[in-house]
Image (spheres, coloured by chain):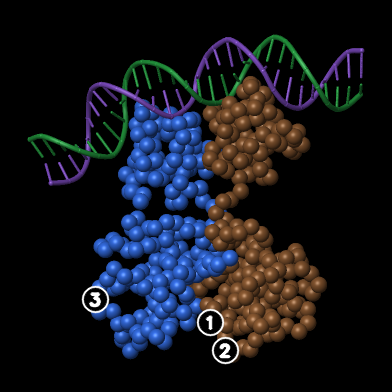
Chain colours: A blue, B brown, C green, D purple
DNA sequence: TGGTTAAATATACAAAAGTACACCAAATCT
DNA sequence: AGATTTGGTGTACTTTTGTATATTTAACCA
């Protein structure tokens, strides 16, 4: 969806975001050129157009008519936090790669208790119902690559993401479902811990 | 400090705030004139200068360089919604009365799907574990006074708030726990439906 | 090596933007 | 009645602003 930025584009986007934060309106192309010691507005124009094309900005053909639409650069909101919702995981990409981001979801800031990167995952299946984690629930995950026994984690097994309880016992490590209908998983091939579940959001019919 | 506004000034300030909220940048004087069916930009200029003088706005002499500084008109936060967390319910007060509000909690805007008043409630006990509602979970409730059978509701029985499944069957109405250890409640005395559970937020150890 | 892409420059231009001045009209206040 | 305040009109600037074209430079890649 939204492609990668060049260093220069990232720099410009950050300057725009900072300008909005400080002055509460976007800079003009000329102002951007001055800040960057660029002598031609046209260089800015092209950068802005690239940022628009890549889905980070929207612009209307008028003075200062810029709007940041990418969550990473939106002026920070104090009570709220946007995390990427990880969809189907593309083979070979790290789980947090842009390629796997379906969209961004807003979660209460209170859920973020430790530093680090966070993501959200929509729960598939009923393997964790006894832990109160149901299908279609949104679990909020802090990105870590190790965990203690009995913690609920997100694991990547081959190209499959799964939420399970991590168990370390007698030297063995395995993944336990919270549903008697499922048996324990002793991962055979390539697998890794992707994060710890730190929160859950459920939306019900209304 | 900040003096009273005339009706016209208030109107213009609201239009500016609305424009910022919608487009995320301020309107130009010409655009304001168009919206208000005023034929001269100069009329707008004078209104803006009045608003600046009265401490509601700041302006820099450049295109769209307006900044709202009065708290009453600052753009509201879009992704965020604050609902009252209902604590212990004081006898005789309606559940949403200020007396019962413990604090306000921030929830994702996405949870608000229908018009109405909302509140949050911290779950006590394990009577709903089979519905995936655990102790200390925060349930988000839309304030209504009736519900369909099988919906999960918040009921006020005497001065006791409880989350249960509403069952209407063979002319009888009762409240069902989602835990075999609890038996159905056939409310005897004063009771009422306070709302439907529309969402759930859980924070886990980290 | 040659070709592509990112980045910047120089110059030009029409439209849009804020500002200024003179004047008008209605309502409000003393 | 006269003065003041509030709101509006018309025209006329000067700058700013976004955009266009053509050209240059450096980095990267196969």
Against A112, residue B67 (above or below) is above
Secondary structure under tag 3 reads loop
- Mark 3 belongs to chain: A
The quarter of the displayed image where residue B188 is located: bottom right
- Mark 2 belongs to chain: B
In front here: B150 or B79?
A: B150
Q: Residue furthest front?
A: B170
Query: Do marks 2 and 1 share a subunit?
Result: yes
Depth check, mark 3 against mark 2: the one in front is: 2
Q: Which mark is residue A189?
A: 3
Residue that badge 2 annotates: B180
Q: Quadrant of the C terminus of chain A?
A: bottom right
Query: Do marks 3 and 1 share a subunit?
Result: no
CA gap between label 2 and label 1 equals 9 Å
The reply to whether discs 3 and 1 touch (Cβ–Cβ < 8 Å) is: no
CA gap between label 3 and label 1 equals 34 Å
Depth check, mark 3 against mark 1: the one in front is: 1
Secondary structure under tag 1 reads helix
In the image, what residue occupies the spot 46% across and 79% down?
A129
In front here: B149 or B186?
A: B149
- Mark 1 belongs to chain: B
Residue that badge 1 annotates: B130
Q: Is residue A86 left or right of residue A21?
A: left
Secondary structure under tag 2 reads loop
The quarter of the displayed image where residue B138 is located: bottom right
Mark 3 is surrounded, within 10 Å at the Cα level, by few (under 14), some (14 to 19) or many (20 or more) other residues, namely few
The reply to whether discs 2 and 1 touch (Cβ–Cβ < 8 Å) is: yes
Q: Residue B60: x percent and y percent? A: 57, 30
In the image, what residue occupies the spot 66% across and 36% down?
B13
Q: Is residue B123 left or right of residue A103?
A: right
């Amino acid at each position: 969806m939204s492609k990668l930025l060049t260093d220069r584009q990232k720099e410009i986007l950050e300057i725009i975001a900072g300008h909005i934060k400080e002055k509460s309106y976007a800079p003009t192309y000329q102002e951007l050129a001055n800040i960057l010691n660029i002598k031609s507005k046209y260089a800015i124009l092209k950068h802005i157009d690239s940022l628009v094309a890549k889905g980070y900005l929207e612009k209307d053909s008028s003075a200062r008519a810029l709007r940041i639409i990418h969550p990473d650069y939106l002026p920070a909101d104090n009570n709220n936090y946007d995390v990427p919702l990880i969809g189907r995981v593309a083979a070979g990409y790290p789980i947090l790669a842009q390629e796997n981001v379906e969209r961004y979801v807003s979660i209460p800031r209170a859920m973020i208790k430790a530093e680090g990167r966070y993501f959200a995952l929509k729960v598939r299946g009923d393997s964790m119902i006894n832990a109160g984690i149901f299908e279609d629930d949104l679990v909020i995950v802090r990105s870590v690559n190790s965990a203690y026994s009995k913690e609920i984690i997100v694991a990547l097994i081959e190209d499959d993401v799964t939420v399970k309880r991590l168990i370390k016992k007698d030297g063995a490590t395995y993944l336990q479902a919270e549903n008697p209908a499922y048996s324990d998983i002793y991962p055979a091939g390539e697998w890794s811990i992707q994060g710890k579940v730190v929160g859950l959001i459920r939306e019900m019919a209304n």
